[in-house]
Amino acid sequence: MYNTKKNTYVMVEFTVLDWVSGELADSKSKERLKFTCAPIAEIAAVKIQNGKICEHYTNFIGLDGVKAENLYDDGDCMSRFGITPAHLIGAPSLKEAVEKFFDFTEDSIILVRHKTSSYNTPFDFFQMYAKSYGFFFNNPVFALADIVQAAKVKEMLEDGEQDIEHTDILRIAEKLDHLNFWTDIFADYDIFFNPNSKESDKARNDPLSWALAFARLFIAITDFENDALEEVKDDTALPF
């Protein structure tokens, strides 16, 4: 049970450019850029206190050692996120972004979209960079995908589907990677999600819109479970 009234949570989302595939190139040398891992181009964080979204921020991250004005996008790597080289010119460094997130998070519980040991997630990359700068996140980290999966399985049980097979759980887990599944979940909990909404003030596929939507989803799921728990307590109460 996640206590949104007692604990403080921070939902974090990133825009990660897949430079391993060499989709970005230097317009002057016409050579593809080679990096050891995918760089983080943008970060967004949303804080949840007392069961409500109380604070958020977002910023682009400058490209270390590369002049952003010299980049062109020959593989739609940047354009699919609505990012242009101009967004990255003069942006804070990755070290500055780490410091800001470290101060923003403090001792909060961190929420990420996925958390797995089978592959490196954006937060894994971020932690790797943070350690290189001397910042260590010892905060508990929970994956929203796991929380949603548990909620859906619980819902299936409560609907009377007692004979849930392992394949049913795997089917839910597989769908968590698809955009349509997330939007369906938002609809299930009556959450309005629109990247162009005034709340995010964005007009693209940006991490702040997703972080806000995921934060609302987390609150909705925990509120629903807390309300259900209170109803159970009321039903079992003695009539005197």
Image (tube, helix red, strand yellow):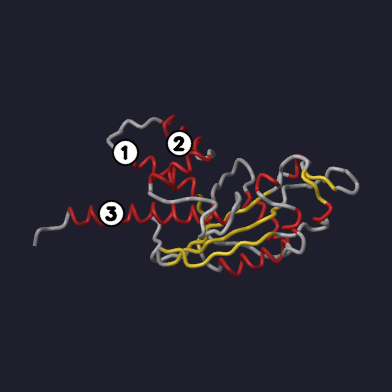
Quarter-of-image position of residue 216: bottom left
Residue in view at x 72 percent, y 41 percent: 76
Q: In the image, 5: left or right of 11?
A: left
Q: Could you tell me the amino acid type at mark 3?
A: Leu
Q: Could you tell me the amino acid type at mark 1?
A: Leu
Rendered image: mark on residue 229 = 3
For mark 1, what is the residue?
157
Q: In the image, 112: left or right of 73?
A: left
Rendered image: mark on residue 207 = none
What SS does tag 1 mark? helix
Mark 3 surroundings within 10 Å by alpha-carbon count, few (fewer than 14), some (14 through 19), many (20 or more): few
For the residues labelled 3 and 1, say whether their Cβ atoms are less than 8 Å apart.
no
Measured as percent of width and height from the top left, residue 97 is found at 67, 64
Q: In the image, 101: left or right of 85?
A: left
Mark 2 / mark 1, whichever is N-terminal: 1
The quadrant of the picture occupied by the C terminus is bottom left
Measured as percent of width and height from the top left, residue 166 is found at 42, 31
Residue in view at x 38 percent, y 40 percent: 153
Rendered image: mark on residue 172 = 2
